[in-house]
Image: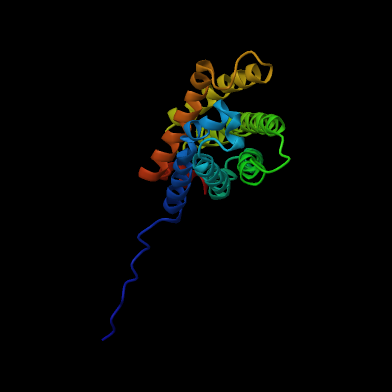
Amino acid sequence: MTTTVATAPPTTDPMRRRAFAAGALYLLTFVSMPTLALYGPVREHADLVLGAGSTSGLLWGALSEVVVALAGIGTAVVLYPVARRQSETAALGFVTSRVLEAALILVGVVNVLSIVTLREEMAGTAGADPAALVTTAHALVAGYDWAFLLSQSLAPVVNALCLGYVLYRSGLVPRVLPLIGLVGAPLLLASDVAIFFGLYDRMAPVAAFSALPIAVWEFSLGVYLVVKGFRPAAVAALR
């Protein structure tokens, strides 16, 4: 008498794991939202470089942005094998945009950490020129603002167009989600152009309003991928 032992199917589908990882990484990119408050002291008081106040907020903010940069690349790496089945051009565009975004985020982080270094090594030392230190701090803050505009404001436009196109065409998630990103992308782009030409500051309320649809798109996508994953029918159609 022979006994047949049935092999249990895997309990977790690889595509479900991939969707969960992508969603978790998308949600992780929101960890830097408090930087607006954490960087407030140096934005409002450049004389912080002279030794006034604490730099712990700057360090925590810089660390959170490093996490965002790495998580952003992670979303592209995880989603590329899926996105390329629908459009290799859009998938490569998404990966490239994410890498450039991360690089510019790190440029901004270097500017912030440079202010901390100036404060620790130069402030209060003999021969240090306070006016020169404050001017340098202003320049580093300006450099951070430009890096932010090109990375965490402009790059999400490209991300939404590339990934939104793939997800809308494939139906891997409800089409209303990528539609939010595709509608929000030109709105944010118009705002970025206005900031670039000095029509208003990136801290202006209209700038925050223009970024809201993209923020909703990325957050809702992250939540959906974590909770639901890719739609099975759409996954089957891609194979």
Please identify the residue farthest to the top as the structure is shown: 199
Where residue 167 sits: x, y (%)?
51, 36
Q: Residue at x 58, y 22 (%)?
A: 202
Q: Is residue 8 visible?
A: yes
Where residue 228 sits: x, y (%)?
36, 43
Please identify the residue farthest to the front as the structure is shown: 126
Where residue 60 sits: x, y (%)?
50, 44
Where residue 68 sits: x, y (%)?
53, 43
Q: Quadrant of the N terminus?
A: bottom left
Nearest the viewer among 24 and 62 is 62
Which of the 4 quarters of the picture holds residue 143? Answer: top right
Q: Residue at x 60, y 29 (%)?
A: 46
Please identify the residue farthest to the bottom as the structure is shown: 1
Q: Residue at x 38, y 57 (%)?
A: 12
Q: Residue at x 65, y 19 (%)?
A: 193
Instruction: Give the vertical position of 127 relative to 216 (above or below).
Output: below
Image label count: 0
Q: Is residue 98 visible?
A: no
Nearest the viewer among 77 and 1 is 77
